[in-house]
Image: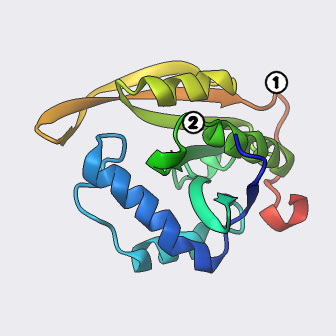
């Protein structure tokens, strides 16, 4: 990883770069299940709706966004409030340099401080690099949805990895906003 890499909260102006990285993965790989480029306005709606309680981080190198990580709600029903889905995407020229791990090194403690209990990550398999990254930062594989998506002329399974941020059976406190812990 470069010494010039900075991890920070995403701002509105970062969305174009975030969408470009995501759309590149969607166009070239089964890692992103989008089957056509997604418009920035769609991402803006999601960002505005989730960013207060779900952090979006960017990795910036020489004033250019080279990767992003974000969390989002797992499901809408109330009992899921302490579970977040996480994802990380790295621009191909920055692959293999520890950028994904650097993003998770900031995102996971932030989510823990907010009060989340369980993190989930879905990975279209096989994807050895993403699987290694998630295992490196503490996730364990917990299940697979078989033939979950058709893309690039083939069926793809989605493996799920989980990371428990808290032990015990006690009732959790309400999740705190990102601004309270960043």
Expressed as whole percent of the image width and height from the top left, the position of residue 73 reads: 57, 53
Work out how far the residue at label 2 is from the one at label 1, CA to CA, in angstroms.
Answer: 16 Å
Q: Quadrant of the C terminus?
A: bottom right
Secondary element at image label 1 = loop
Q: Using the image as rendered, state which of residue 93 and residue 31 is in the foreground.
A: 93
Whether residue 151 sits left or right of residue 161 in the image: it is: left
Whether residue 84 sits left or right of residue 9 in the image: it is: left
- What scheme was used to colour the molecule? rainbow
Expressed as whole percent of the image width and height from the top left, the position of residue 41 reads: 42, 80
Secondary element at image label 2 = strand
Residue drawn at the location 67% of the way across and 58% of the way down:
61
* Structural crowding at the residue carrying mark 1, measured as other residues with C-alpha within 10 Å and reported as few (<14), some (14–19) or many (≥20): few
Whether residue 166 sits left or right of residue 45 in the image: it is: right
Residue marked by disc 2: 120
Expressed as whole percent of the image width and height from the top left, the position of residue 127 reads: 39, 27
User: What mark, if any, has residue 74 been given in the picture?
Assistant: none
User: What mark, if any, has residue 167 been given in the picture?
Assistant: 1
Q: Quadrant of the N terminus?
A: top right
Q: Residue furthest left?
A: 153
Residue drawn at the location 28% of the way across and 65% of the way down:
37
Whether residue 141 sits left or right of residue 147 in the image: it is: right
Residue drawn at the location 78% of the way across and 47% of the way down:
3
- The reply to whether callout 2 and callout 1 are in contact (CB within 8 Å) is no
Labels 2 and 1: the sequence-earlier one: 2
Image vertical order of residue 126 relative to residue 61, above or below: above
Expressed as whole percent of the image width and height from the top left, the position of residue 179 reads: 84, 67
Choose top left, top right, bottom left or bottom right for residue 66: bottom right
């Amino acid at each position: 990883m470069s010494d010039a890499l900075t991890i920070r909260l995403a701002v509105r102006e970062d969305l174009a770069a975030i969408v470009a990285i995501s759309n590149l993965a969607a166009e070239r790989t089964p890692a992103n299940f989008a089957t056509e480029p997604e418009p920035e306005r769609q991402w803006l709606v999601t960002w505005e709706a989730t960013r207060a309680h779900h952090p979006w981080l960017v990795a910036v190198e020489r004033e250019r966004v080279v990767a992003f990580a974000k969390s989002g709600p797992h499901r809408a029903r109330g009992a899921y409030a302490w579970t977040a889905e996480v994802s990380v995407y790295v621009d191909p020229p920055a692959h293999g340099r520890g950028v994904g791990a650097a993003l998770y090194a900031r995102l996971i403690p932030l989510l823990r401080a907010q009060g989340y209990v369980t993190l989930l990550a879905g990975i279209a398999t096989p994807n050895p690099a993403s699987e290694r990254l998630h295992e490196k930062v503490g996730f364990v594989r917990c299940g697979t949805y078989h033939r979950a998506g058709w893309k690039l002329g083939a069926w793809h399974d989605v493996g799920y990895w989980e990371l428990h941020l808290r032990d015990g059976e006690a009732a959790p406190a309400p999740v705190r906003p990102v601004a309270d812990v960043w």
